[in-house]
Image (cartoon, rainbow, N blue to C red):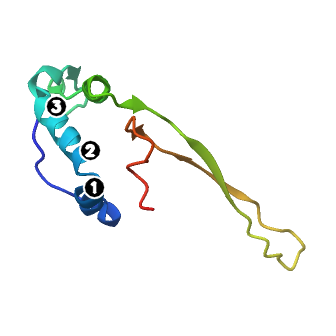
């Protein structure tokens, strides 16, 4: 596989280049090491392209995880619940409900610093 384009959400690419250059090199070498032609295992069921071979998302994910595990990466999922209490009372005395959002993070390096944090 190759990296065709970059989308740097909140300057994440630039942050990795400056602060965690070695992590970026590991990620880019992992992407280049994957042979995408072997991952066309999903058969389309769409009416317009029925029978067409597509890239399997589950196979792509498992291949990425396997390659990153070889470099010492481990999957680490962190769940945190963020609550935003909107205590604005309406005229009828009903308060709006508490909204909860489940925030999950994906891959993390075996190093103690979280490469996704901008802090």
Mark 2 against mark 3, which lies toward the viewer? Answer: 2
Q: Are marks 1 and 2 in contact (CB under 8 Å)?
A: yes
Which residue is at the front of the view, 70 or 94?
A: 70
Whichever of labels 1 and 3 marks the residue nearer the N terminus, that label is 1
**Quick one: SS at disc 3?**
loop
Vertical order, 5 against 89 (above or below): above
**Percent x, y for residue 2?**
10, 41
Mark 1 against mark 3, which lies toward the viewer? Answer: 1
Q: Residue at x 22, y 26 (%)?
A: 44
For the N terminus, which image quadrant? Answer: top left
Q: Residue at x 43, y 47 (%)?
A: 113
**Percent x, y for residue 54?**
18, 28
Numbered tag placed on residue 76 in the rendering: none
Q: Are marks 2 and 3 in contact (CB under 8 Å)?
A: no
Q: CA distance from mark 1 to mark 2?
A: 7 Å
Q: CA distance from mark 2 to mark 3?
A: 38 Å
The residue singled out by tag 2 in the image is: 23
The residue singled out by tag 3 in the image is: 49
**Percent x, y for residue 26?**
21, 39
**Quick one: SS at disc 2?**
helix
- State left or right for residue 12 relative to residue 24: right
For the C terminus, which image quadrant? Answer: bottom left
Whichever of labels 1 and 2 marks the residue nearer the N terminus, that label is 1
- State left or right for residue 106 relative to residue 58: right
- State left or right for residue 21 relative to residue 111: left
Which residue is at the front of the view, 47 or 39?
A: 39
Where, by quadrant of the figure, is residue 35 drawn?
top left
The residue singled out by tag 1 in the image is: 16
Q: CA distance from mark 1 to mark 3?
A: 39 Å
């Amino acid at each position: 596989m190759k990296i065709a384009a970059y989308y740097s959400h909140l300057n994440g690419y630039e942050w990795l280049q400056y602060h965690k250059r070695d992590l970026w090199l590991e990620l880019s070498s992992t992407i280049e090491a994957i042979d995408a032609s072997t991952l066309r295992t999903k058969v389309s069921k769409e009416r317009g392209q029925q029978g067409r071979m597509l890239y399997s998302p589950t196979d792509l994910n498992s291949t990425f995880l396997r390659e990153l595990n070889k470099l010492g990466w481990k999957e680490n999922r962190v769940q945190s619940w963020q609550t935003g209490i909107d205590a604005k009372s309406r005229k009828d005395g009903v308060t709006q409900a508490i909204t909860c959002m489940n925030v999950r993070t994906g891959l993390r390096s075996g190093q103690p610093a979280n490469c996704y944090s901008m802090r």
